[in-house]
Image (spheres, rainbow, N blue to C red):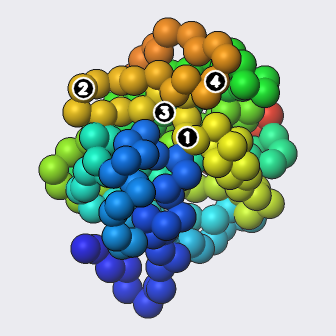
Amino acid sequence: MTKIQNSKPEIRYLDDMRVVLHDKKWAERAKNAPLYYMYRGVREKNNLRYDITVIPPKMLGQEFVKTKGHEHRGPHQEIYIVLEGRAIYLMQKCQGKVVEDVLAIIAKKGDVAIMPSGYGHITINPARVELKMANWVSKKMKSDYSLFEKMSGACYYYTKLGWIKNKNYKKIPKLRFDKPLKSIPRDLRSFLERAGSSL
């Protein structure tokens, strides 16, 4: 597992994730273990924070390993950059249990993905190699995990059988796909803190 020099990671364990997993039978009997590693505040610039997350390859029963998922408190965006491996960024816009929009960006090394204001999101490692990614986000941003915990994950699970809908949501639109960016926008600070941008 990749380690970041002079940084100590926050570790997300299986016990933190059982509530958001698709394969409940597997989750009930699986032993607790570390799933991914978050190095927060590796760099800071202009009230922005640069983090690195490392997600080793793993299957959570039938489901590919993923992050827990969160929404942003306040009008903040987030930029992700794939440093190594591959990622699927799944984003959803919700009103309660009703999903208004859901999309996925499939990204490889060097690709950039935008998590827009108003969208909750998760990251999935769909590959057999380690995913290492960086993100820039406002230092004012706070993560809210409550919707994903309440709904047992995002509105779609990515599994060995492909995409499966999470039936805890009342309405789930068809999953749409968007392409990643090839570079980071120049005015990083204003881009991240701008509210209401659409994809």
Answer with mark 4 or mark 3, whichever residue precedes in sequence. 3
Give the spatial CA distance, label 1 vs label 2: 17 Å
In this picture, is 13 found above or below 4?
A: above
Answer with mark 3 or mark 2, whichever residue precedes in sequence. 3
- The answer to the question of whether label 4 and label 3 lie on touching residues, with beta carbons closer than 8 A, is no
- Residue on which disc 3 sits: 90
- The answer to the question of whether label 2 and label 4 lie on touching residues, with beta carbons closer than 8 A, is no
- Residue on which disc 1 sits: 153
- The answer to the question of whether label 1 and label 2 lie on touching residues, with beta carbons closer than 8 A, is no
In x, y percent, where is residue 63? 32, 41
Q: Residue furthest top?
A: 174
Give the spatial CA distance, label 2 vs label 4: 20 Å
- Residue on which disc 4 sits: 169
In x, y percent, where is residue 97? 72, 25
**Tag shown at residue 161:** 2
Give the number of the mark in front: 1 or 3.
1
**Crowding at mark 4 (Cα within 10 Å: few <14, some 14-19, many 20+):** some
Answer with mark 1 or mark 4, whichever residue precedes in sequence. 1
| Residue drawn 49% across the image and 67% down it | 15
